[in-house]
Image (spheres, coloured by chain):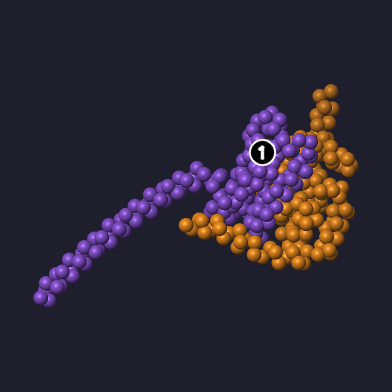
Chain colours: A purple, B orange
Amino acid sequence: MTCLDNQHETKQYTYLSRLLLVLLFILHMYNWYYSLGSSFYSRTMCTASGVIANSIRQKLQTALQTKHLEVLNESYMHNVPKGAETHFKVVVVSEQFEGLALLKRHRLVNDILKEELQNGVHALSIVAKTPEQWDSSDKVVESSPNCRGGFGK
Amino acid sequence: MNSVMRRAFFPIYNNTFKSSYRLFADKSINDKIDTIVKNNKVVVFMKGVPDAPRCGFSNAVVQIMRMHAVPYESCDVLADENIRQGIKEYSNWPTIPQVFINGEFVGGCDIMLQMHQSGELVEELKKVGIKSALLTAEEAKKENSK
């Protein structure tokens, strides 16, 4: 009897371990697939996916009725953790800039994004143009200057 | 998951220490900044010093000033946390660097770059009696070609 019992137990044990192995394998494959997917996702969507980037986009769109809007997360150029949303560049084209000096346009954008600038956004580079100026420009936005490591202290 | 957590918490963690300085950025800092700005024709509030800027945006402004050979006073905001916060309130401008010409706030890095490219900066400097080196070079070129 004891012998039979033992056999039964071992059988059950092997069955369980096999199931576990299969499960582990599935989990592993899932992880692998997910990692592929996510890296692909982050590579293609890095300029648009962030939480803060989205809120910046939405605020500018509603406040300025933008004709053209780019929100670029330039944090990767700086000394911050991967995936951070600290350094941004925005290209804003709006009719509301008509007749406003450069300083006033920038102040307008800074004001709209006041909350973001106080809560984690460390740098904001602004290109503010009227639709006419944007159409007559070459529509190429220069990249921001290289970081010099002054983030934080 | 990790990146999501980081995204969610990084702003908070980044901002914990900043708010405490607000209390100390009182009137005396405002006055201090005011005297610096009013006593110099051109002032640049920047990160680091002109010989060793510690931020790409500050460096860009320094390079523009160098190109125009503008004599200017610089103030390192990293050396004094009170000034770093105080200057943002003084000019109602959220970022560093900040440029003042003749006691008036002109702009940050983006505006300086655009003014440099459009030639507005040369005019602005002329108004306060500073002749841009680029203008001098241009005149010399014309003289030579005559």
Image location (x, y in percent) of residue A124? 67, 48
Give the vertical position of A16 relative to A31 (above or below). below
Picture mark count: 1
Give the vertical position of B35 relative to A13 (above or below). above
Q: Secondary structure at mark 1?
A: loop
User: Is A64 left, or right, of B139 in this rendering?
Assistant: left
User: Is B140 left, or right, of B46 in this rendering?
Assistant: right
Task: Determine the residue located farthest toward the bottom in the rendered image.
Answer: A2
Task: Determine the residue located farthest toward the top in the rendered image.
Answer: B146
Looking at the image, which residue is at 56% across and 45% down? A48
Screen quadrant of the C terminus of chain A: bottom right
Looking at the image, which residue is at 15% across and 69% down? A8
Neighbours of disc 1 within 10 Å: few (<14), some (14-19), many (20+): some
Image location (x, y in percent) of residue B109? 72, 46
Looking at the picture, which amino acid does disc 1 mark?
Answer: Thr
Looking at the image, which residue is at 78% across and 39% down? A100
The answer to whether one can see residue A14 in this image is: yes
Image location (x, y in percent) of residue A86? 61, 53
Q: Chain of mark 1?
A: A
Q: Nearer the viewer, residue A152 or B64?
A: A152
Q: Nearer the viewer, residue B3 or A75?
A: B3
User: Is A76 left, or right, of B117 in this rendering?
Assistant: left
User: Is B56 left, or right, of B121 in this rendering?
Assistant: left
Screen quadrant of the N terminus of chain A: bottom left
The answer to whether one can see residue B74 in this image is: no
Q: Which residue is mark 1?
A: A66
Looking at the image, which residue is at 21% across and 67% down? A13
Image location (x, y in percent) of residue B36? 85, 56
